[in-house]
Image: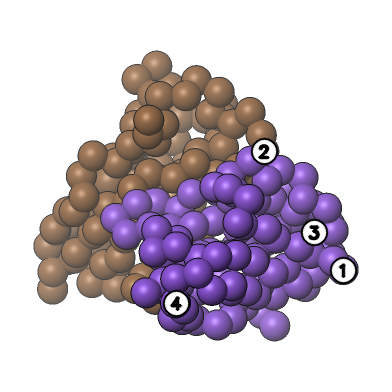
Amino acid sequence: DQQVKQNSPSLSVQEGRISILNCDYTNSMFDYFLWYKKYPAEGPTFLISISSIKDKNEDGRFTVFLNKSAKHLSLHIVPSQPGDSAVYFCAALGGSNYKLTFGKGTLLTVNP
Amino acid sequence: GAGVSQTPSNKVTEKGKYVELRCDPISGHTALYWYRQSLGQGPEFLIYFQGTGAADDSGLPNDRFFAVRPEGSVSTLKIQRTERGDSAVYLCASSLMAGAGEAFFGQGTRLTVV
């Protein structure tokens, strides 16, 4: 039973356009959400996070939006760059403050 | 080192053999985690250490899996009587302390059991 769901296995966008990656969760105990980026043969790298007391967090080209009532979050990348091509994982913390629950990931391809 | 280091990068072993996977966390990080990523899945939690002690080992799949962190720094994940289903990428991560924001991951050890 997946508690964090990334329903799009892949996404392809043109360079310069916006990339929107979606994530849904089912566990109401989750109160902190993170996005990780993973290149092949490397470990996941932290990208951006958001606490459940906020609905938006922005860091440069990356913005995460949280809709608690819908149990939905999204990562916006604008403008997208070819170097953003990677697998993006949504992860959640809650109950414990150390056990990350990950989604299956979305492979983003940014075409030049 | 600057980041989390895992050795070996790749390990191929025969079914039934014993393997050890090593993790060198970021210096000063007291919290250490092991995750397992199977093909097409996200990382799944295995065990969490705070200092030398395993604070939560609820993610270990069975008693063939064991992990230690005797001096509160390097950790070793040990798998006995390996099975083909153990094939996965084993990821180690560390953080300054639990709940201190993001964890930093190593590059992983790809274990293949043949």
- Label 1, on which residue? B71
Of discs 3 and 4, which sits in the foreground? 4
Instruction: Quickly name the residue at label 4.
Output: B14
Q: Which residue corresponds to the image point at 75% horizontal and 72% vertical from the top-left? A: B74
Element at label 4 = loop
For this view, does B27 lie left or right of residue B93?
Answer: right
Left or right? Give the position of A22 relative to A69.
left
User: In the picture provided, is B45 more to the left or to the right than A65?
Assistant: right
Secondary structure found at label 2:
strand
Q: Which chain is purple?
A: B
Q: Chain of mark 2?
A: A
Q: Earlier in the sequence, mark 1 or mark 3?
A: 3
Mark identifier at residue B30 = 3
The chain assigned the colour brown in the figure is A
Q: Of label 3 and label 4, which has the lower sequence position? A: 4
Q: Chain of mark 1?
A: B
User: Do the residues bearing badges 1 and 3 touch, measured as CB atoms within 8 Å?
Assistant: no
Question: What distance separates the C-alpha of mark 1 from that of mark 3?
Answer: 11 Å
Q: Residue at x 69, y 69 (%)?
A: B76
Looking at the image, is mark 2 or mark 4 nearer the viewer?
A: 4
Residue B111, position in %: x, y? 45, 72
Applied colour scheme: by chain
- Kindly identify the amino acid type of the residue bearing the numbered disc 4: Glu
Q: Which residue is mark 2?
A: A97
